[in-house]
Image (spheres, rainbow, N blue to C red):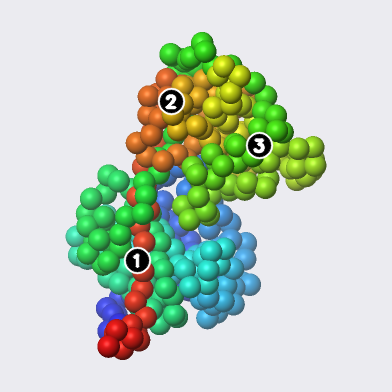
């Protein structure tokens, strides 16, 4: 795919002059859908644009910059009306990229701008030897899902973000057979396996989840405390057997995270018992944010007064090397 074939309205983002306009566009397109992390991202974009504008080095790209703001814009008469952020995901592999913040101004929708920006990003990845492209799309955006599928993206998984509802104190149907207690060090090996299954690195590298950081123990607690954090953990016990765990972690972006791990056969009753304790034990329960596989433990979350903020589909496109055809001959 030759990048020179793309519409003349598309150009690479120029950080020094574009970031404020991009923040305005994203805010306008997603204001009613944005979660705490999204609002925090916009705030950081504006702060960086206004505080470091004169220090940006021209010509930086996703491959040679640490700033996750590069990508492409669609410009009409000097006005940015479309945006796509393209991030090289070095935490996974330098050949892996993430497409994010695909936004088109409402007055310019229906012209295929989002698709053309995505095609331009795919071409960029191809030219730079990328092998995989990830993206997330809301489950309630069928038109975008169709575009991505048409461009060769396939669904990997679905994840739901749960937050406390207006009446999150209203707890129902907790199990009297399950005892919730402070977690113990000897329970960690089993809990670690549960957490690893719920939060695989391939789907949570963009979340502030760290198995090492939440591991119980004095030295871990001290390290987190000295860095301004706070972590608390609980275990759900049934007939003396550990069936689940919840770890609350104070965040720094307007929300606090709860990481859940359970025995599959006891998922609903473990979560139904753990979440009320977590909600009643922390100072600001309204800040709680839970990322969990979509379609699972729905009754348990509702019992604890949680509501679905959104469900995202993780999609992936695997690039085919140019020499793949020759190799098959």
Q: Quadrant of the C terminus?
A: bottom left
Q: Earlier in the sequence, mark 2 or mark 1?
A: 2
For the question of whether residue 166 can be seen, the reply is no
User: Of label 3 and label 1, which has the lower sequence position?
Assistant: 3
Q: Which residue is mark 1?
A: 317
Packing grade of label 1 (10 A; few <14, some 14-19, many >=20) is: many
Instruction: Provide the residue designation for mark 2.
Output: 268
In depth, the one of 55 and 266 nearer the eye is 266
User: Which residue lies most toward the left here?
Assistant: 110
On screen, 81 above or below 191?
below
The one of 221 and 228 positioned closer to us in this rendering:
221
Q: Is residue 17 rendered to the left or right of residue 47?
A: left
- Residue beneath the point at 36% across and 46% down: 158
Which residue is pictured at 62% across the width and 66% down the height?
52
Q: Residue at x 44, y 63 (%)?
A: 98
Q: Is residue 199 above or below residue 11?
A: above
Using a 10 Å C-alpha cutoff, classify the residue at mark 3 as few (fewer than 14 neighbours), some (14 to 19) or many (20 or more): some
Horizontal relation, residue 230 to residue 322: left or right: right
**Which residue is tagged 3?**
188
């Amino acid at each position: 795919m030759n990048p020179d074939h793309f519409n003349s309205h598309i150009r690479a983002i120029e950080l020094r002059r574009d970031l404020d306009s991009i923040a305005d566009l994203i805010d306008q397109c997603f204001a009613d859908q944005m979660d705490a992390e999204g609002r925090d991202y916009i705030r950081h974009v504006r702060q960086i644009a206004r505080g470091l504008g004169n220090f940006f080095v021209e010509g930086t790209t996703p491959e040679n910059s640490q700033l996750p703001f590069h990508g492409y814009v669609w410009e009409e008469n000097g006005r940015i009306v479309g945006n796509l952020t393209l991030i090289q995901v070095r935490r996974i592999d330098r050949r892996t990229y993430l497409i994010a913040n695909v936004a088109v101004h409402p007055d310019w929708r229906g012209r295929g701008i989002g698709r053309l920006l995505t095609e331009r990003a795919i071409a960029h990845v191809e030219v730079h030897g990328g092998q995989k492209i990830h993206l997330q799309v809301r489950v309630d955006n069928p038109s975008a899902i169709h575009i991505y599928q048409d461009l060769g993206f396939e669904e990997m998984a679905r994840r739901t973000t749960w937050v406390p509802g207006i009446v999150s104190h209203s707890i129902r149907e907790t199990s009297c057979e399950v005892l919730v207690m402070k977690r113990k060090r000897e329970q960690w090996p089993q809990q670690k396996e549960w957490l690893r299954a719920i939060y695989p690195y391939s789907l949570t590298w963009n979340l502030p989840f760290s198995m090492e950081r939440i591991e119980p123990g004095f030295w871990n607690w001290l390290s987190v405390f000295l860095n301004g954090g706070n972590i608390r953990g609980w275990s759900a016990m049934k007939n003396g057997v550990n069936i689940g765990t919840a770890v609350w972690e104070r965040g720094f972006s307007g929300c606090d995270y709860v990481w859940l791990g359970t025995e599959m056969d006891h998922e609903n009753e473990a979560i139904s018992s753990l979440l009320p304790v977590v909600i009643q034990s922390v100072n600001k329960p309204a800040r709680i944010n839970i990322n969990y596989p979509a379609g699972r433990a729905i009754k348990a979350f509702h019992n604890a007064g949680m509501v679905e903020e959104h469900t995202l589909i993780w999609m992936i496109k695997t690039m085919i090397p140019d020499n793949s055809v020759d190799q098959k001959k």
